[in-house]
Amino acid sequence: MDSEQLLDILHTDPDFVVVNKLSGMLAVPGRGPNKIDSVADRVRRMFPGCIKQPAVHRLDMDTSGLMVVALSADAHRNLSRQFHERQTRKKYLALLDGVLEQEDGVIELPFRLDVDNRPIQIYDEVHGKMGITHWRKLAVEGQTTRIEFTPITGRTHQLRLHAYHEKGLGIPIVGDPFYGRGTGPGQLKLHACELSFAHPITGQELTFSSASEF
C-alpha cells in the first residue's frame, strides 16, 4: 500500500514535517518485524534523505493528533531539546466517560511504570515522578464530558492516568483499553489538537492545529 496515502501530512518543510497521526498507529517502530510500521517509518520512507531516527517526541498508539517529525540531524537535535526543556506547547482534547462537575484545575500526581504490568502507569508518592496537567471543561455531551488538557510535563500515559485516577479527575477517557472501558486499539478519545514550537533553523514561532474526529 502507498504509505503516503496512509499518512496525513499537514505541513512540509525542508527540515521537518507535521503529521496528523491516526488513533491505533504507532508513533515509532516497536519490537519485532510486525511493529515496524509507524509514523516515523512512513516519514523515513516518504522523504528521501530523511535521517534514520526522525521522531523527536511520541504519542501513545491510541492517541491521535499532531506530531512533528525531523528530516535532518540539525532539526532533530533542536526539536528534541525544545521538548526536553519544555519549550513546546501542547493541547489535547478528550472525552471523559462520565459527567465531570468541576470546571477547571491543575492535576499534580507522581506516577511510574508498573513493571509487572507494562505499559500501565501507577500512582506512587514515593518512587513516582511528578506529572502536571492543566485542564478545563468545555462541555457536557450526554453522559460524557469534553475536556481540554494542557500538559506541562510529557510523561507516558500522563493524561490517561490523570483522567482516570481518583486523585485526578476520577473519570477515564472514553475508549481507554488500559484505564477505562475500551476493548481494543483505535477507540481512545484523546487527540493532540494543538502544537507550538520554534522552527528548528530560523527560530520562528509556529503553531499547528488539528480538529478531532469526535
Image (cartoon, rainbow, N blue to C red):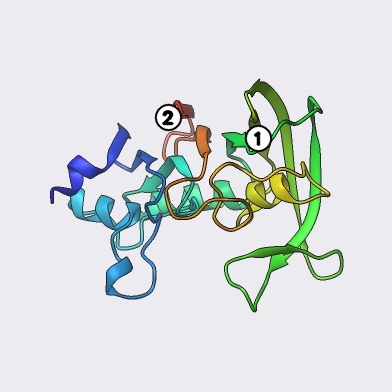
Q: Secondary structure at mark 1?
A: strand
Q: Is residue 84 above or below residue 107?
A: below
Residue under the point 61% across and 43% down: 173
In the picture, the disc for residue 178 is none
Residue 91 seen in the current view: no
Left or right: 56 as drawn, with respect to 44: right
Amino acid under disc 2? Glu
Q: Which residue is mark 2?
A: 213
Q: Position of residue 103 (x, y in %)?
A: 79, 24
Q: Residues within 10 Å of mark 1 (few under 14, many from 20)?
A: many
Q: Secondary structure at mark 2?
A: loop
Q: Position of residue 190 (x, y in %)?
A: 54, 40
Q: Residues within 10 Å of mark 2 (few under 14, many from 20)?
A: few
Residue under the point 13% across and 51% down: 1
Q: Nearer the viewer, residue 78 or 170?
A: 170
Tell me which numbered mark, 2 or 1, is placed earlier along the sequence: 1
Q: Which residue is mark 1?
A: 149
| Residue placed furthest toward the right | 126
Amino acid under disc 1? Phe
Q: Position of residue 114 (x, y in %)?
A: 67, 72
